[in-house]
Image (cartoon, rainbow, N blue to C red):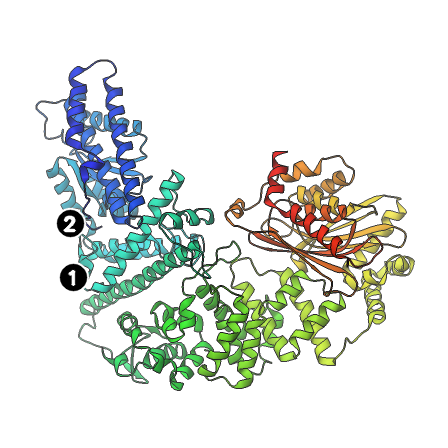
Amino acid sequence: MNQVRIPRQRAIIDRRALAETLDGIAAKGGADARGAVVETLRDALDAGRDELRRRLADKPHAGHECVAGHAFLVDQLVRLIHDHVVACDYPAANRSQGERLAILAVGGYGRAEMAPQSDVDIAFLTPTRRAPWCEQVIEAMLYYLWDLGLKVGHSSRTPDDMVRMAKGDVTIRTALLEGRYVWGDEALYEEARRRFWADVVTGTERQFVAEKLAERNARHKRMGDSRYVVEPNVKDGKGGLRDLQTLYWIGKYIHKVRSAAELVDIDLLTEQEYRSFRRAEGFMLAVRCHLHQITGRAEDRLTFDLQRQVAERMNFTDRPGKSEVERFMQFYFLQAKRVGSLTGVFLAHIDEQFAQKRARQGLLAGFRARARSVKGYRVFGGRIGAPADDWFRKDPVRLIEIFRVAEAEGLEIEPATMRQADRDSRLITAKVRNDPRANALFLDLLAGRNDPETVLRWMNEAGVFGRFVPDFGKVNAQMQFDMYHHYTVDEHTIRAIGLLNRIEKGELAEDHPRSTRLIHKITSRRAAYVAVLLHDIAKGRGGDHSVLGAEVAEELCPRFGLGENETDLVAWLVRYHLLMSATAFKRDLTDPKTVEDFVGEVQSVERLRHLLILTAVDIRAVGPGTWNSWKRQLLGELYDVAHERLRLGHMHRGRRERVAARKDATREMLGDDAALVERHADEFGDAYWIAEPEDIAALNLRQFAAARRLDHDLSIHCEVYPSRGATLVSVIAADHPGLFYRIAGGIHLAGANIIDARIHTTRSGWAVDNFLVQDPLGQPFHERDQLERIETAIDDALANRIELVPRLAKRPLPRSRARAFDVRPRVIVDNEASNRFTVIEVNARDRPALLNRLARALFECQLIVHSAHVTAYGERAADTFYVTDLLGEKIIAGPRVAGIETALLEAASDQRQAELEDA
């Protein structure tokens, strides 16, 4: 793209010395001459790559120099091979006009940007088709290149072929756009170049831009459609190298520029923007080179397991609150963000140029529509712009105002004005941040009724957001090094604000029915939006981000103009924004103590409403698939019981009333089989009737009655449970020690993940266990053969027909990249969370059949599991068990608790997993 000076070229490859060596081999001749040539060239290739590897290790950010060095190395090899083939293999003393050959580098090789494992894209140009000498030389050259182990993409065309094919294929046109003369007949190359620009490019500029932008949009969609995905593709991802190359292609195609630097000369980029362009490009090229060297292949995806290695190679180090890999990825995303800003400004300028050209050439060429004025801003063609270059300098509060007006009026911001805002964002000082008018405008934008998400993203791209709210600037482009969060903190936050806006407008009523109703009942919608903005504001500070974030909220809310009550509410919401999800997903909601503890923290219906809404948008904004009907159901259940307790001051129904009501509801669901309730009700204790909803109770009673009638010792039933987004697996068997862990093992062997389990024992000694399971992608099992596979696996596990431990250990994790993370097992034994049970929570790396291993450890500790609740956060699993000893009592004794902790830590450890796999 730009000419890069390559220092000490002969240390990479000395073409003159190699040419003499090859001449010497040819002069000796012999049967093995070709093999000697290949060996000599291979040694030169390996030595050149080693030299470039050393240089990158010494200067790990020198991306431009590394890719130019690899292109230079291949150039010299191609030239050597060409000269050797023409001189020694197919010499022709008096070649005709048709026996000419030009070699072009195209694509990335044409730009002189080659990562260590990049393909070598070559175009051979010949004056005519099927010239025997040319075909022989081309074939011989390709065999040499292949023998060197290079991945070669090649074509052989005449100038006529080139023009015809380029006209019909934008990919070929783009490759030739970057065509670079390497060797051979230079006059032939110049003829082809002249014809390409005259016959292909001229008159097709608008079509090329449209096709490249459509291609870019399709690529973004394929790659996740965000530049903030936490495993980005350095080459093809949004904000990556391909986006920078697209700018260059468009600029070159329309304005015939030969390098990216010339984009400044034609006013498509400023000098400062060009420097940003080169800085971002150089960093990403360096990252790509490191990826290729680490993996030994053309790897462009910055996966979790590679991020740490690249961070180390590029000399990033830990800082308080941020690991080396988080600092590296934050820098990466800042570059990707800059690429996005450049792309937006650049393309808008191109669009304007085309529009001006259309206006000059059209029927109304002499007519100029007048811009209107909105609050002093110029509005034309759906875009708002600053009326003068010193507009923001005269009053820096306007840097906030323009975004507020754009959101309120549904306008885009002119590219030139975005450029101004970016340039002048440094005018936002403490005086502007504390200006009441600026804060009122910001709050109106944040809680805007139209599309605050998009406008806040523009504000962030222009650098205004982070300067006006410096705490937000600190989390700009900050990734969270885990497999749960899909986006950087700033992108997650802005997405959550957009989701809140969509819920308020009723656009997500199907997925969020309660939140859609409740958002119109809260007393302060401003508090709701500010809480979403601030809920993760303190991430990366080295402490509990919820506690630190509440302190930030207490400082910022008064500045934004919120009253004392609103400030207290926002600070509380930020402090406890994880409370509702932790309670719903990790605790037994049928245990009265769970509800009492939750209500004790929440204390008001207003807080409860806000907390449900914040929890919903926070989970959904984590990434695709993180919100599902299972989570909606659990959060809804917790909201309903907590709302009843807060509204009435007590639970509306005591234990006896709740059991009676559940039995009545079950009778109604059973219809003609209602008598089953009377026949078997005494078998099932009160705990069962409180824990199980009436639809599962009805199913269990029918299954239990059928098993008793048929005198079956084991009954297994599987069916899809749509309201929970899972598959229900009900197992009725003669109760015996270890039953739970064996059932769990069978379910895991069938390829299912357990997300919830309720374990009951009837008075006559029958186990009635209900499991909710999903596939590895978080979806229910639907197909009959899948359900039968689960039933068979459980049956085999309980009958001891299979060896559970070795078979489970060999099951691969659905996401093996979890090994890239350091997740130390942690066990918490809590005797305060329930009045009847000891609650044990185990946090560990997610792995095959973790629940089975933990359940077995509990069995070996002589504990009875009454319910289990399983939550996965990417690579980390959090499994919670409600247990008693064999006498139905809590585990209080210190030595006993310590023994349980030790057993569970061993079961959850990576070392134990490795031992099982080896066995």
189 relative to 671, above or below: above
Left or right: residue 824 versus residue 316 is right
How far apart in space, not on screen, are marks 2 and 1 (Cα)?
Answer: 23 Å
Inspect this view and state whether residue 273 appears.
Answer: yes
**Percent position (x, y) of residue 441?**
40, 82
Residue drawn at the location 35% of the way across and 57% of the way down: 239
Q: Which mark is residue 70?
A: none
**Percent position (x, y) of residue 480?**
48, 58
Left or right: residue 246 versus residue 601 is left
Q: Which of 146 and 172 is in front in this view?
A: 146
Residue that mark 1 sits on:
265
Left or right: residue 456 versus residue 757 is left
Secondary structure type for disc 2? helix
**Percent position (x, y) of residue 319?**
42, 59
What amino acid does circle 2 point to? Ala
Residue that mark 2 sits on:
198
Q: In which quarter of the image is residue 580?
A: bottom right
**In this rendering, which labeled residue sits more in front, label 2 or label 1?**
1
Residue that extends furthest to the left in the rendered view of this protein: 94
What amino acid does circle 1 point to? Asp
Residue drawn at the location 29% of the way across and 40% of the way down: 54
807 relative to 166, above or below: above
Residue drawn at the location 19% of the way across and 61% of the way down: 264
Q: Give the crowd class for mark 2: few <14, some 14-19, many >=20 residues within 10 Å.
A: few
Secondary structure type for disc 1? helix
Q: In which quarter of the image is residue 166?
A: top left
